[in-house]
Image (spheres, helix red, strand yellow):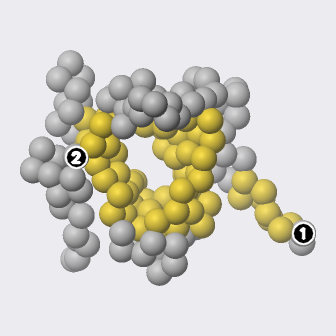
Amino acid sequence: MIEGVTTKKLSVIPDERGRLMEILRVDDDQFERFGQVYMTTTYPGVIKAWHYHKLQDDNVTVVKGMLKLVLFDDRKDSPTCGEVNEFFLGDHKPLLVHIPHHVYHGWKCISETEAIAVNCVTEAYNYKLPDEHRLDFDSPDVPYDWGIKMG
């Protein structure tokens, strides 16, 4: 696992009224501080990648659909520099993934319907100076192929 990345298995508690799923609590190991919470969607087959933050850590989960979330450690001083992690999260695997700043990340919607992700981040979005540093999804700087691995 990439240095600083952690995961938390999420439990869904259903009853006759519906269901509840706790995502992130102040007493979780993943919680550092509150910046903001936002929801984003991705349509089937769409890839949103690559980017990292210099200040912000992310805590991502998927509440509908499925995403393939991929992380790449490009931090020269990290013991896991060059490592790639791949996670599948959503309807079939409720999971929270903590992504530390300076780690590239991106995802692909692998469900037949739109995926809905919720991200609780450690910094509020700065509209004047966004903490977004991007590469193209197919950049040769990231050793990852977004294709399906058949077999």
**Residue 144 lies in quadrant:** bottom left
Please name the residue shown 41% across and 29% down the image. Answer: 129
Q: Position of residue 106 (x, y in %)?
A: 34, 51
* Residue of label 2: 135
Gap between marks 1 and 2, in whole Å? 44 Å
Q: Which residue is mark 1?
A: 17
- In the figure, 93 relative to 76: above or below? below
Q: Is residue 83 left or right of residue 107?
A: left
Residue furthest top as drawn: 77
Position of residue 11 measured from the top left corner of the image (x, y, whole percent) = 68, 53
Residue placed farthest to the right in the image?
A: 17
- Amino acid of disc 2: Leu
Q: How many marks?
A: 2
Judged left or right of residue 45, residue 127 is right
Is residue 14 visible to us here?
yes
Q: Nearer the viewer, residue 42 or 79?
A: 42
Q: Nearer the viewer, residue 145 or 11?
A: 145
